[in-house]
Amino acid sequence: MGYVLNRLIQGLTVIAAMAGLVFVGVYAIGNPVDMLISPEADQAEIDATIARLGLDKPLLEQFLNFVSGVLHGDFGTSFIYNEPAVRLILDRFPATLELAVSAVLIAILVGIPLGVIAGLIPDKPAGRSIMAVSILGFSLPTFWVGMMLIMIFSVWLGWLPSTGRGETVELFGIPVSFLTASGLKHLLLPAINLALFKTSLVIRLARAGTREVVGQDYIKFARAKGLPESRVILVHLLKNMMIPVVTVLGLEFGSVVAFAVVTETVFAWPGMGRLLISSIVQLDRPVIVAYLMLTVLLFVIVNFVVDLLYALLDPRVRRKGA
């Protein structure tokens, strides 16, 4: 209980500190009034717009009003869309979440088998080739890979669409595209592009875990008993090398959701990232602050869950935390 309370207090402290930093950082940039009114507007119209947006108040008072609104579930109203900022973000959250989940699944299904193979045969050409590909995945810029995917599979071959989300259907009241043929085609390219870096990371983690576990006595004993190699790998090896991989994937999932901006922009995917880019261009401060605060909250929740899982898996962590 003490460990959980300690982690909860740390998470709340991080959220409070980031709220101040995000608010001050965003509200110190530019003047949204210049984007919202006509250049021919007189001073009376300018003053009325500033007062309507609450920008005539001191920064501290604006921040206190923002904190009060957040505590009541209100992140402010968008300057551009004149809608609650949190509603704009949550309307686009399912698209980003679907893209992130697809990317993480690709990273798991591709990265773990390749990482295990590279760990079992590190000195053979196949193992070295896999590691070379993983280094390439780390090195290539996401936006460039996205444009190459569009050029090859959309322009040259014409197999897959390059933009949009395609047809969607509702699943438990949430619009999803992976259940339709059109939506799945639209999802494939951006999901692969977003998964590239994470797949390279999983390959390296899986290889390192495999190299560490494969020399343990229980693996040697299992092989000495005459167990099939497939059982040794699938049961004894995978079970023991997956803990660090799962932990890192849990943390990386938050980053995939939060930082899918480039992929969503390249493929015109209607998620939170595109909304953030347009809000930055138009200086729509409430939407920017709401997005960043929800991102911070997402990271804190994911880290909190990972800490709890670690405590469940390793009692030493609970004792140390207490």
Image: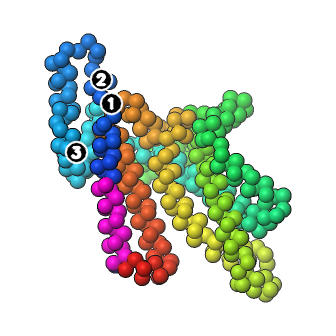
| SS state under label 2 | helix
| SS state under label 3 | helix
User: Type of residue at label 1?
Assistant: Gly
Disc 2 to disc 3, C-alpha distance:
22 Å
Mark 2 Cα-neighbour bin, 10 Å: few <14, some 14–19, many ≥20? few
**What span is in magenta?**
2-17
**Which residue lies under the disc numbered 2?**
34
Location of the N terminus (image quadrant): bottom left
Q: Residue at x 33, y 46 (%)?
A: 22
Disc 1 to disc 2, C-alpha distance:
9 Å
Mark 3 Cα-neighbour bin, 10 Å: few <14, some 14–19, many ≥20? some
Residue 86 at least partly seen: no
| SS state under label 1 | loop
Disc sitting over residue 63 in the figure = 3
**Which residue lies under the disc numbered 1?**
30
Task: Check the image and report above or below for 107 versus 233.
Answer: above
Q: Position of residue 59 (x, y in %)?
A: 21, 40
Label 1 or label 2, whichever lies nearer to me, is 1
Disc 1 to disc 3, C-alpha distance:
17 Å
